Amino acid sequence: MNAGRLIYLMGPSGAGKDSVLQGLQQSLEGRRCRIARRVITRSAEAMGEEAVSVSPREFAERERAGGFAMVWRANGLAYGIPREIEEWLADGYQVIVNGSRGYLDEARRKYPDLLAVLLQVEPAILRKRLLARAREDVDQIEARLARSAQLSGSTFMRGDWRIMRLDNSGNLDETVVQLLRLIDSH
């Protein structure tokens, strides 16, 4: 059996990564593909995604115990992808993770053949989505938007031909179909 491939979905907060992954879930039946649930140091009430919420202390304990395949910190939170993805990949599954643009270089070092997919959204729509989800105050939202502009505008992101780009400014179902096509074609 061939080893699986990591599909690294990334984009700014509010781009709709979680919504796309939820929409994709039903279409994966019958395919050798799994979606990994992130572990995040955010309260369960503020999640808005299918992730595991843990305290900073519990996260640190899991990290020290080697429980994560990938770990990064952004926006005052810690994020981890559980080590179980290693088994899934070894068993030949395609594994989709909700990743970070800032961690992409490290993810590529660990998984050189990963498929990087950047979910993009028009800035005005992104601001509107972040305000609507009411997870953060206006200053935190502005900090997220500034980080997003910095990462998206970097030469690294703009000039990397290996990153597949999907626009999620419009219809969610269309974005899900486009991502499914990317998965199937790669």
Image: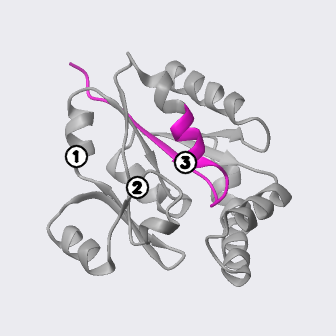
Q: CA distance from mark 3 to mark 1?
A: 20 Å
Nearest-to-viewer mark from 3 and 1: 3
Q: Which residues are magenta?
A: 1-23
Q: Does the image show residue 162? A: no
Q: Position of residue 135 (x, y in %)?
A: 61, 70
The circle on residue 84 is 1
Residue at image mark 2: 51
Q: Position of residue 26 (x, y in %)?
A: 48, 26
Badge 3 marks a residue whose secondary structure is helix
Q: CA distance from mark 3 to mark 2?
A: 9 Å
Of mark 3 and mark 1, the one earlier in the sequence is: 3
Going by the numbered disc 3, the residue's amino acid type is Asp
Nearest-to-viewer mark from 2 and 1: 2
Q: Does the image show residue 22? A: yes
Of mark 3 and mark 2, the one earlier in the sequence is: 3
Determine the residue positioned at 67% across, 52% down. 15
Asked if residue 11 lies left or right of residue 128, the reply is left
Badge 1 marks a residue whose secondary structure is helix
Determine the residue positioned at 81% across, 59% down. 123
Going by the numbered disc 1, the residue's amino acid type is Glu
Of mark 2 and mark 1, the one earlier in the sequence is: 2
> Quadrant of the rendered structure where residue 6 is?
top left
Query: Eyeballing the image, is 136 above or below 177?
Result: below
Badge 2 marks a residue whose secondary structure is loop
How many labels sit on residues? 3
> Quadrant of the rendered structure where residue 32 is?
top left
Is residue 175 highlighted in magenta? no
Residue at image mark 3: 18
Query: Eyeballing the image, is 74 above or below 29?
Result: below
